[in-house]
Image (spheres, rainbow, N blue to C red):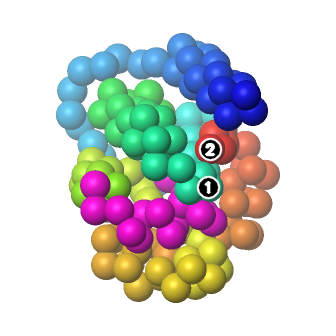
Amino acid sequence: MKQKVLIFTVLVILALTAASHVKAQTGDNLQTRDTLKIPGNEKLVILWTSGDRDVALKMVFMYTYNAKKYKWWDDLTLLVWGPSAKLLSEDKELQDYIVKLIESGVAVEACKGCADMYGVSGKLEELGVNVYYTGKVLTDYIKEGRNILSL
């Protein structure tokens, strides 16, 4: 029951977030931008902590990819933290999807402290994930006014 309530809550948040931030959905002009010049309300950090594969495939990755593809946000970061780091290091389909996200221009970062605890920092780096200590970085993202979607 708790899981159903959590999934429902996440879907409601997703729907509200997507509805309020949908932009023109055409064009493939993916430019590198100076993120300091982008207002905080146009930045999204997806904080992926869940070790649940279905959450990864059917919410985190699907939303992240489409948010980038359709330019729903000017600045998009996927932060891999905790059990999600272990899951990513073990699942080939998720690894292929992460590479797809990186190639689409999503900034993919992982907490080095968490990844080290699971012994997967090297594996994540091989995938192209930027692995470093992110506690202060997440704090700065929040203080800067970025939107945070935590799953």
Give the secondary structure at mark 1: loop
Query: Mark 2 — residue?
Result: 151
Which one is in front, 47 or 23?
47
Q: Residue at x 27, y 43 (%)?
A: 30
Give the alpha-carbon distance from disc 1 to disc 2, as whole Å.
Answer: 6 Å
Percent coordinates x, y for residue 19 in the rendering: 54, 14
Please, what is the three-letter code of the amino acid marked with disc 2? Leu
Percent coordinates x, y for residue 130 in the rendering: 44, 72
Please, what is the three-letter code of the amino acid marked with disc 1? Thr
Residue 150 quadrant? top right
Which one is in front, 64 or 70?
64
* Highlighted magenta segment, given as a residue range: 78-93
Quarter of the rendering occupied by the C terminus = top right
Give the secondary structure at mark 2: loop
Percent coordinates x, y for residue 92 in the rendering: 28, 62
Asked if 90 appears above or below 2 in the picture, the reply is below
Q: How many marks?
A: 2
Label 1 or label 2, whichever comes before in sequence order = 1
Q: Residue at x 52, y 21 (%)?
A: 18
| Residue 87 part of the magenta-drawn span | yes
Which one is in front, 111 or 57?
57
**Residue 91 appearing in the image:** yes
Q: Residue at x 63, y 75 (%)?
A: 114
Q: Residues within 10 Å of mark 1 (few under 14, many from 20)?
A: some
| Residue 11 part of the magenta-drawn span | no
Residue 49, labelled with which disc? 1
**Residue 60 appearing in the image:** no
Percent coordinates x, y for residue 124 in the rendering: 40, 74
Asked if 84 appears above or below 111 in the picture, the reply is above
Residue 23 quadrant? top left
| Image marks 1 and 2: residues in contact by CB distance under 8 Å | yes
| Magenta stretch: helix, strand or loop mostly | helix
